[in-house]
Amino acid sequence: MRRNMALQLDGWRMTTAEILYHMPDHPGILQSFVWQKLDYPPEFPKLHKFLDFWKENLDGPLHSVRVGHVEIISPPKFRPVAASFQVH
């Protein structure tokens, strides 16, 4: 837990990748796989390591990869209240 906190303070972000790949037995059909880990943008070393492993060891050839990342630790966001109700 502490290690994750230190990584996040150092710029690591929760990264999600949607990986589309061709089914090995039916290459005309695409299958989706979601990968999620702490990674360091914009290089994304853990994602690249995973994709290299995929290409070398799995039969389903990659079609595309869509990546998103977000800070987990961030300053609090303030939103003013639009209405207030009192319940007795």
Image: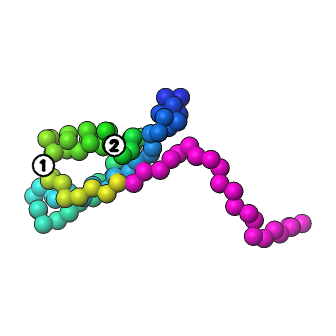
Q: Quarter of the image holding residue 82?
A: bottom right
Query: In percent of the image, x 65 and y 54: which residue is there?
Result: 77
Residue 65 falls inside the magenta stretch: no
The residues tagged by marks 2 and 1 sit, at their Cα atoms, a distance apart of: 23 Å
Residue 73 falls inside the magenta stretch: yes
Give the extent of the magenta segment: 68-88
Assign a secondary structure to mark 2: loop
Q: In the image as oriented, which residue stretches furthest toward the top?
A: 2
Q: Tags 2 and 1 in contact by the CB under 8 Å rule?
A: no
Query: In percent of the image, x 52 and y 36: which residue is there?
Result: 9
Q: Is residue 79 visible?
A: yes
Q: Is residue 57 above or below residue 67?
A: above
The secondary structure making up most of the magenta span is loop
- Circle 1 residues within 10 Å: few <14, some 14–19, many ≥20: few
Q: In the image as oriented, which residue stretches furthest toward the right?
A: 88
Sooner in the amino-acid sequence: mark 2 or mark 1 = 2
Q: Which residue is mark 1?
A: 59
Q: Which residue is mark 2?
A: 44
The amino acid sitting under disc 1 is: Asp
The amino acid sitting under disc 2 is: Phe
